[in-house]
Amino acid sequence: MTSFSYLELCMDCTRKAVGLGAEWCDVAAGTGRDIAVSIEKSGIKTADAGQGEDVGIRVFIRGGMGYASVSGRDPRDIDEAVRRAVALAKEATPDPDFKRLPAPDPAPEVEGLFDDSVAGMSVEDVVRIAVANIEAGKALEPEVNLSGHVGLSVGEGALASSTGVAMETRGTDIFADIEALVKHGADTGFFYDFDFGRRLADCRLDAVAASAVRGARRFLGARRIKSGRMALVLGPLASYGFLGGVVAAANAESIQRGRSYLCGKFGEKIASPLLTVVDNGLVPRGVRSGAHDGEGTRRRPLTVIDRGVLVSLLHNSYTAGKACTESTGHGTHAGGISPTNLRPALGTRPASDILREVKEGIYLESGELRADPASGDVSVSIDFGFLIRNGELVHPVESAMIGGNIFDLLARLDAVSSDAREEPGILMPTLRIQDVQIAGAE
Amino acid sequence: MHDLARHLCDLAKQRGAAFADVRILHRRSESILVQDGRADKLAAYADRGIGVRVLVGRCWGFASADSLERSRGEQCVQDALALARASEEFVSDPAMIADAAPVVAEDRREPQIPNGAMPVKEKIARLLEYEHRGRAVGGDAIVNSIVNYSDGIREEVLANSAGTLVRTASARAVTTCMFVATDGQILQRGTEHRGILGGAELLRQVQPDDYSVRAAEKALALLKARPAPAGRFTVIFHPSITGLLVHEALGHNAEADGVWAGQSILEGRLGEMLAPETVSIYDDSTIEGAFGSYAYDSEGTPSRRRPIIEKGRLVGYLHSLETAAKFKASPTGSGRAESYDCRPIVRMSNTFMERGAAAPEEMLRGVDRGIYLMDGHWGYVFVQKGQFICHAGQARMIEHGQLGDALRDVSISSMTLDTLKKIDAVGSDFEMKMPGMCGKEGQSAPTDCGGPHVRVGDVVVGGHAAQ
């Protein structure tokens, strides 16, 4: 990594902002290096590399917020950004709900977020992973059309604030995401898979294409289905999106502002008692892990839903101050709120048992099952789904949709699997929801 | 900056590139978020840098740096060449570039109100006025209101090893608003978006009655709407939904990079009748002031109007320099890069269906039971499968040829080729008010889309209850 001190840069910008009139200020700065190799038509398409630095300055004056970001490390550009952030904060409307930025709360960094073996990889190494995927995919299905990316990023950064926060972080990420398109005559099967992690040893990057090809084959022979009410089984990828949407709705700002379907639900039962979801940003090697959030608040595991009851909201320093509570460590530097690693509590029976009990239903392998953030209404397409009959996946479905309301879906959840797909930091079980409205085209 | 761009192209060529292009970009923008009566968050963004793309043998290499220093640019050339060479032996589909005539041009599209000329205070006052007028419609029923505005300029120098040197400057401004209303039981929201190729004059052009008041009225109307039924229906698309149809369902499939990669349902269908003769669909980046317009694309190709479907027949794809070479077609000026650190890829601009002859009110006739879909929110597409999804913020039942009950927001899902064939009426009206950022391969591009009212027989509607 570089010998340049981003922490000193952040502290210097903070001092300058305070000198210009900032009452509160925090500054984040860092650098990142990326390599990405793209795959197209089952061959290498291009290799890209980029290196960038950026500085973000956040200033509060009488609670009004000004923010400026700038790329590169030109001192004139950075000084101008500091001045602009202060000037914008002076123009913002004073906000008495803003209380304070977080005080320093040092903690050791979460283990396993930086991997020398990723940081030391060359473009040739990344190309080799891409080629291994292409070969493995074609070995299974010679005519498969593979596309996607294999890449890595290596970053380091710092955060300093006028309250005395001064911290440095570094991290690595590596990923492969590959789509497979299989054509048998006029029939088309399409699916994807991915793997990612902070450390090379946590991934099986060369196995992604084979998994995508197997998935694509399963989606050959899609057929239309009749409309009706039936069970909906969410596979691991679908359940991750579904629960991620519910946890994102527990954003304290959306609730304080009165625009979330979870308004007025704090402490209330919102789901089946089978559902417990923990947000944990401290999981070693987790893709969304870090000892602190983007504002410097120390993270801690947070149970968001406990046996169906909404027991916590996700706070940053602003919403916590407004609610006279503690930040939960979900703040971003630009002022937002973001979940970290989701870890639902697992059930007692394997996914295979849960599926076997379904007489008629839909198995949603992957796809967005998200509600309107205000009304909670759900109206989504079954992008990657199968018809279930007598416990078996009969065929993939096309032109079918799911309709309903998020609270009905959460209440009708009647099974969480004991087994789950696990990615670094994240758990994805299988869920089953009874009596869901499906619209079909037959 | 153009000297540096030319120097880097020459250097790449000297060191073995068959083709090279260099983009030097500088962007500046500011945004204001007004929420619940206060200017909450004010922000400024600036970035600049160099992107170098080289073609070596059969492979592309691309490298970027967030600096305009000559030495960093030269390092990018070095890195891009090394990246291409490291990958070349594994290329199965050799890279190509069209033998286009060099373009030397400069185009500066100055906004009517230059960037920074309207004081922040004046912008805030206008946004607060929008918000106040919207809130006044709903009174205490409005529980949250947000009005967002941003404007910015983009200056770009593009040079390539064939002799092209294009300098452009353009400005864009966009505003969005959202009002959330409650009846004490449920929450509903209404949104509106406006955007132009221009500057802060947008705030003078957009009037509250046609913007924030409409958004607030939508939220209030949705409180009284009932959930949509589920199943197959004849539907009438409002122009905003027609816009989503032509952008998501057809436009992405007409991007020639996807067609070449075997990932489009339009592969091998040039010349085929895909829709009734009443249907013509274009992508046009020359429309004055439209949010998706530009003078030259990120490869230096002049902007133009691109026919995709004319009188029902598929007549063309959207091309970059690379796809034009592969298809032996003319570049269409559709190679766009979001920033200096992105390769140009094939993108849409302003995509629309041309107006037809049917009076919109006549379309209701003969529809015994159907749904009128309005207020296009979002959509997405799986080009590989030919499946698309559109989300309507509002809808109305159609019963016996008459508009009936108001319905809540609802999505539809269908197959592109089926849907185009089932268009049985194209309206004589036209509207294109869907400015937004289209995402593809991690890059976003400003686009707009629209068209007339359109009637489609038999579409799956994802409602809450059985018909």
Image (tube, coloured by chain):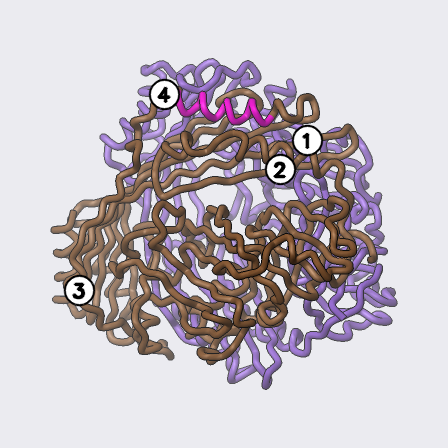
Chain colours: A purple, B brown
Location of the C terminus of chain B (image quadrant): bottom right
Measured in 3D between alpha carbons, the distance from the residue under mark 1 to the one under mark 3, in whole angstroms, is 55 Å
- Tag count in the figure? 4
Circles 2 and 4: CB atoms closer than 8 Å: no
Residue A100: x, y in percent? 52, 18
Which of the two discs, 2 and 3, labels the residue nearer the N terminus? 3
Q: Is residue B386 magenta?
A: no
Check disc 2 and report the residue beneath it: B190
Looking at the rendered structure, the kind of residue marked 4 is: Val
Would residue B139 appear left or right of B14 to someone viewing this image? right
Looking at the rendered structure, the kind of residue marked 3 is: Pro
- Give the class, few, some or many, for how many residues have Cα within 10 Å of label 1's Cα (few <14, many ≥20): many
Check disc 1 and report the residue beneath it: B181
Residue A19: x, y in percent? 32, 15
Residue B223, relative to residue B381: is it above or below?
above
Residue at disc 3, secondary structure: loop
Residue B79, relative to residue A144: is it above or below?
above
Magenta residues, start to end: B122-134
Measured in 3D between alpha carbons, the distance from the residue under mark 4 to the one under mark 1, in whole angstroms, is 34 Å
Q: Which mark is residue B102?
A: 3
Measured in 3D between alpha carbons, the distance from the residue under mark 2 to the one under mark 4, in whole angstroms, is 33 Å
Which of the two discs, 1 and 2, labels the residue nearer the N terminus? 1
Residue A348: x, y in percent? 83, 55
